[in-house]
Image: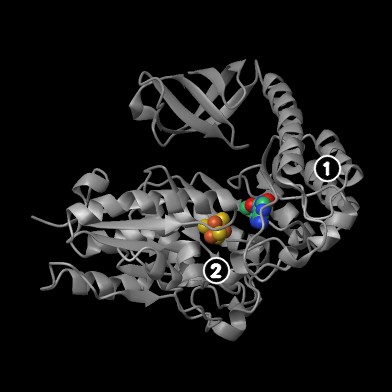
């Protein structure tokens, strides 16, 4: 009987996709997926350190696993992801029942570890392994790892790794390393295969997809068929994110292309034009503003003023009047006073986002903001977070109500989780729509009349 693995994932889409790669490596090695921790031979916790809350949840989950290891010493426990990278061997000291620690750049090291584990050793393991090598070498870990995907309609594809922005609050450059773009030919091969397997929607993943291609020439040799230059093709060394979108747009069978995340500073006119010109690129952009106050934006090292940010929003909306815009907000950054905070509230009123993710500032190890003066107390941070969320809830709902009566194109993802007779899917603007219909519609684009707006989704009916 084959051994079984179980993965518990915390954090962002990048991490969820990394878990798909981890699952792919176990599957390739002959492991089956367990139903949960109870019947697993190996448990992997893929961790996130972006905010304190995610970190605390991980510690409580890891604490819970001690009991399972005590009961069955043959159980193997691995810790992956951003906390593994940051804490390294410190985790072995605090949690001696952990067997393997590997960082986000070292997913490929699983192959060897799984090989050892599948070998003769079967009783209690004192053989601790830690692989948290963090390198700027772009060749490293840009391997084409096997992927076991969660959905059947929509798939994630990494186009770059790491981040060079060093926003003063953010841990990512320290956990995922410097920015590295993946080679065009590898991306195209993966997407072409996904389309052949029947996937209809691709979401391109990177911390800052707008700067895709930077330094690609220095690190990767030109790769056919994109090294032609001149008419029709383009030289690999000059390829940027817009060029990549154009190449992906040519892949047969794909109905939609999405991407996250974009940095406002690097959002070019060329990209706006490209989005406008390519019908399969969804009319949605996630453009984190973080704050409406220039003073705070500067302390955050974001590289733009609110006015510059707003100009980009205006350019997006004049090119694509129906584009959905979403954002991230941090409340209670060190030094944020009531006036700064009001500027963030005004930004929400002025831009009227389709949706936001908002977080209270969280002090993160290694980041520059830790050393800023005037850290705010938890109560103020939480109060401001609640005010931001209340304001946005009103705006989101109002914008959803405006959609009632409209006919929108929806890509059907599958059965709704709450009502099995209903289907669920998304509009190009990334709004969730639920409606009655048969599963044969899965993976197709259907026109749906919106009947009722809810806070987080829409109800509708298919137009035959
Ligand atoms: N505290 C609060 N929020 C943070 N984010 C990143 N780092 C922190 C932090 N230290 C938020 C930002 C980012 C999103 C992914 O998480 O808003 O855009
Ligand atoms: Fe993703 Fe950042 Fe969390 Fe790492 S720390 S999992 S990159 S959100």
Label 1, label 2: how far apart the Cα atoms are: 29 Å
Q: How is the image coloured?
A: one colour
Q: Is residue 441 above or below residue 379?
A: above
Residue count near mark 2 (Cα–Cα under 10 Å), binned few <14, some 14–19, many ≥20: many
Q: Secondary structure at mark 1?
A: helix
Residue 175 - label: 2
Q: Quadrant of residue 402?
A: top right
Residue 344 - label: 1
Marks 1 and 2: CB-CB under 8 Å?
Answer: no
Residue 318 - label: none
Q: Is residue 26 left or right of residue 199?
A: left
Tell whether circle 1 marks a residue whose Cβ is less than 8 angstroms from ligand 1: no
Query: Where, quadrant-wise, is the N terminus in this rendering?
Result: bottom left
Q: Secondary structure at mark 2?
A: helix
What is the x, y in percent for residue 196? Answer: 36, 53
Residue closer to the observer: 159 or 356: 356
What is the x, y in percent for residue 264? Answer: 76, 56
Tell whether circle 2 marks a residue whose Cβ is less than 8 angstroms from ligand 2: yes
């Amino acid at each position: 009987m084959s051994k079984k693995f179980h993965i518990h994932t915390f954090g962002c889409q990048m991490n969820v996709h990394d878990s798909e790669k981890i699952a792919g490596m176990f599957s390739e090695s002959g492991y089956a997926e367990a139903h949960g921790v109870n019947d697993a031979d190996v448990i992997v916790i893929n961790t996130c350190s972006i905010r304190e809350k995610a970190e605390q949840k991980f510690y409580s989950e890891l604490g819970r696993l001690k009991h399972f290891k005590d009961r069955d010493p043959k159980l193997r426990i691995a810790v992956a992801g951003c906390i593994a990278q940051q804490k390294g061997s410190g985790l072995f000291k605090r949690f001696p029942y952990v067997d393997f620690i590997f960082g986000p750049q070292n997913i490929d090291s699983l192959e060897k570890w799984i090989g050892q584990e599948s070998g003769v050793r079967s009783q209690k393991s004192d053989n601790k392994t830690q692989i948290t090598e963090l390198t700027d070498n772009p060749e490293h870990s840009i391997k084409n790892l096997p992927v076991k995907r969660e959905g059947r309609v929509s798939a994630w594809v990494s186009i770059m790794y790491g981040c060079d922005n060093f926003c003063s609050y953010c841990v990512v450059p320290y956990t995922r390393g410097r920015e590295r773009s993946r080679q065009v030919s590898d991306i195209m091969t993966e997407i072409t295969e996904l389309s052949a397997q029947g996937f209809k929607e691709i979401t391109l993943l990177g911390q800052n997809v707008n700067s895709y291609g930077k330094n690609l020439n220095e690190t990767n040799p030109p790769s056919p068929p994109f090294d032609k230059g001149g008419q029709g093709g383009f030289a690999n060394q000059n390829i940027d994110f817009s060029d990549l979108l154009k190449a992906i747009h040519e892949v047969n069978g794909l109905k939609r292309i999405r991407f996250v995340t974009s940095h406002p500073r690097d959002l070019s006119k060329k990209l706006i034009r490209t989005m406008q010109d390519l019908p399969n690129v969804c009319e949605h952009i996630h453009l984190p503003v973080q704050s409406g106050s220039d003073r705070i934006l500067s302390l955050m090292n974001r590289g733009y003023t609110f006015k510059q940010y707003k100009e980009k929003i205006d350019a997006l909306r004049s090119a694509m009047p129906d584009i959905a815009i979403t954002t991230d907000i941090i409340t209670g950054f060190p030094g944020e006073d009531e006036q700064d905070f009001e500027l963030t509230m005004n930004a929400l009123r002025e831009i009227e986002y389709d949706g936001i993710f908002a977080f209270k500032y969280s002090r993160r190890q290694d980041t520059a903001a830790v050393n800023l003066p005037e850290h705010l107390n938890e109560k103020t941070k939480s109060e401001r977070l609640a005010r931001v969320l209340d304001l946005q809830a009103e705006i989101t709902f109002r914008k959803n109500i405006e959609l009632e009566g409209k006919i929108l194109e929806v890509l059907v993802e599958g059965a709704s989780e709450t009502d099995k007779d209903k289907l669920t899917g998304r509009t190009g603007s990334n709004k969730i729509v639920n409606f009655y219909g048969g599963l044969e519609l899965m993976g197709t684009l259907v026109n749906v009349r919106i009947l009722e707006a809810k806070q987080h989704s829409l109800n509708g009916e298919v137009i035959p």
